[in-house]
Structures are given as C-alpha cells and as structure tokens.
Image (cartoon, rainbow, N blue to C red):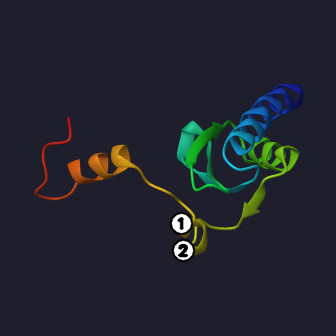
Amino acid sequence: MAADSSKQAGRLAKQISGFAKRHGGSAEAQIAYVGQRGFRISLVSSDGTWGDLMAPSKEAAEEAVQAAGATLKESFDGEMAEHMRTGPYEWQRMAGIQVGGPANR
C-alpha cells in the first residue's frame, strides 16, 4: 500500500512540477479533504494560472507537493486567491451558477 501511495505521489509531483514550469516556474499549493474522493491539491502558479489535482491520501498529497518544490499553504487564504488570474471561461461559468442567472446545465 505504501508503495502505491509513493508511486501516486511521484506522478502527482511530476504534474505539479510541469504545471509550475509551464506557468512561471513556481506554484503555491493548499491541500483540502473532500471526502471519500480523497484530497484536493489546489495550485496557483506564479503567473496566476490555477488548477487542482486529486490525491488518494493526505500523505500522498503532501509528499507530491514537497517533491515538486511547491510552497504548501495552510489555507486557501486571500493572499493565495489574490494571485489567481481568471479568464473568460471562469467568468462565464461563475455567472452561470449565480442565483437568478441562467440555468446550470
């Protein structure tokens, strides 16, 4: 089981490293438990691009973030959110789920 977790952490670390490299060279990460699905690794790169990955365990998520050299944040706070850059897709998607907005299909 530990070997599987380590393999998964290695794959996640490669994804995190690649993401950071493509988007300015560094990234901040925050890990959150999302129930049976596991743990979400939320990422914000130095150029403001953001995304997330799923890890099967907190240990795998922490190992991946550390191996990738990303900065692990305790919470997804205002400072981390301030670095995020949103584009037309995000604005259109957010507008679609507001109360009174178009139906979310």
In terms of image quadrants, where is residue 21? top right
Q: 34 and 80: which one is in front?
A: 80
In terms of image quadrants, where is residue 47? bottom right
Mark 1 = which residue?
81
- Residue at (60% x, 67% y) in the render: 80
Cβ atoms under marks 1 and 2 closer than 8 Å = yes
- Residue at (14% x, 43% y) in the render: 103
Mark 2 = which residue?
78
Q: Residue furthest bottom?
A: 78
Question: Residue 44: image x %, image y %?
Answer: 62, 54
Q: Amino acid at mark 1?
A: Ala
Question: Residue 50: image x %, image y %?
Answer: 56, 49
- Residue at (72% x, 34% y) in the render: 15
The disc placed on residue 98 is none
Question: Residue 98: image x %, image y %?
Answer: 21, 57
Q: 68 and 45: which one is in front?
A: 45
